[in-house]
Amino acid sequence: MSLVTVNESCIQCGLCIEECPVYVLKMGEKGPEEVVGANCNGCGHCVAICPSSAIDNAKAPLALQVDAHEFPKLNPQQAEHFLRSRRSIRNYQDKSVPREFLARLVNIARLAPTAANSQGISYVIVENKQLIEKATEITIQMVENSPVRHLLEAAITGYREQGLDSVFRGAPNLIIAIADKNSPYARNNAISCLTYLELFAPSLGLGTCWAGIFEHFAVSENSPLPNLFNIGEDKMVVGAVMVGYPKYSYRRLVDRNSLDVMYIN
């Protein structure tokens, strides 16, 4: 069954053919046609680039695409400020994030670019604060019995002696990215998706931070953490971020290390 359909508006400009990353299309008598045996990856570039809305693709329907001209573009200064103003939040207000906002976060995450448009990332949204606290205790126990304990001794001491949570930082919510265990692109895809989520979060008044300690031990052999969150044996944790309302606001944009770059002409 053909994925691509072309209507009478086609002007045979060939842009869809040039833009196709997997060379699925060729020019026919009435417009673009699929190459026999080619495998469309559903990226939707052909539909998005068409100047006359003449092409449709079952894997990336025209009806689900949004007119890009409806939205204003950030100027360079605005874009720089937007990117630099994102901070990793490690102090949260004691209130949960509405489910509507959590859903918007993962909906943005699913729109991120992935290797070969493989996508394949799904999400577990944890709204139960007690469950997150239980995951903290389990993670700390795993740290205590881990070969890398010496690297995380401060996290153990802070938790056991002062009740400080270095795993989830007291965040009220957690978003875990999962993927099939046989997916070769899963980790990189998750990084892309969760970065989109983190950049979008401040627009909802939310803060985020990667839960790196949890990630490390969630993928350890025989880890009880995936089972705690009802993650099936055919799935693996490929990323996790804590989410909540920031307790404090930042007055300045911090700098990073000096730029280290090499140009090859």
Image: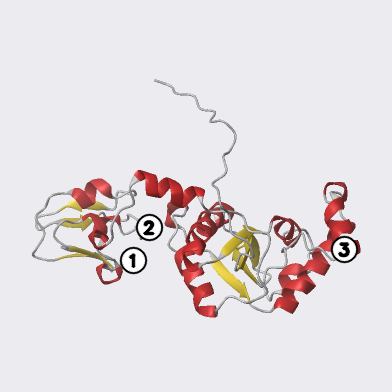
Amino acid at dot 3: Gln
Residue 15, percent from left and from top:
19, 49
In this rendering, the answer to whether 134 lies above or below 159 is below
| Alpha carbon distance from label 2 to label 3 | 51 Å
Numbered disc in front, either 2 or 3: 3
The residue tagged 1 is 59
Secondary structure at badge 2 equals loop
Residue 264, percent from left and from top:
43, 22
Horizontal arrangement in the rendering, residue 94 relative to residue 187 (left or right)? right
Which callout, 2 or 1, points at the residue further toward the start of the chain?
A: 2
Horizontal arrangement in the rendering, residue 253 relative to residue 80 (left or right)? right
Amino acid at dot 2: Asn
Quadrant where the image shows the C terminus? top left
Q: Residues within 10 Å of mark 3 (few under 14, many from 20)?
A: few
Taking depth in this image into account, of 200 and 13 the one nearest to the observer is: 200
Taking depth in this image into account, of 139 and 222 the one nearest to the observer is: 139
Residue 189, percent from left and from top:
52, 55
In this rendering, the answer to whether 123 lies above or below 167 is below
Which callout, 2 or 3, points at the residue further toward the start of the chain?
A: 2
Secondary structure at badge 1 equals loop
Taking depth in this image into account, of 243 and 62 the one nearest to the observer is: 243
The residue tagged 3 is 162
Amino acid at dot 1: Lys
| Alpha carbon distance from label 1 to label 3 | 53 Å
Residue under the image location 47 percent in, 49 percent down:
83
Locate residue 9: give its quadrant: bottom left
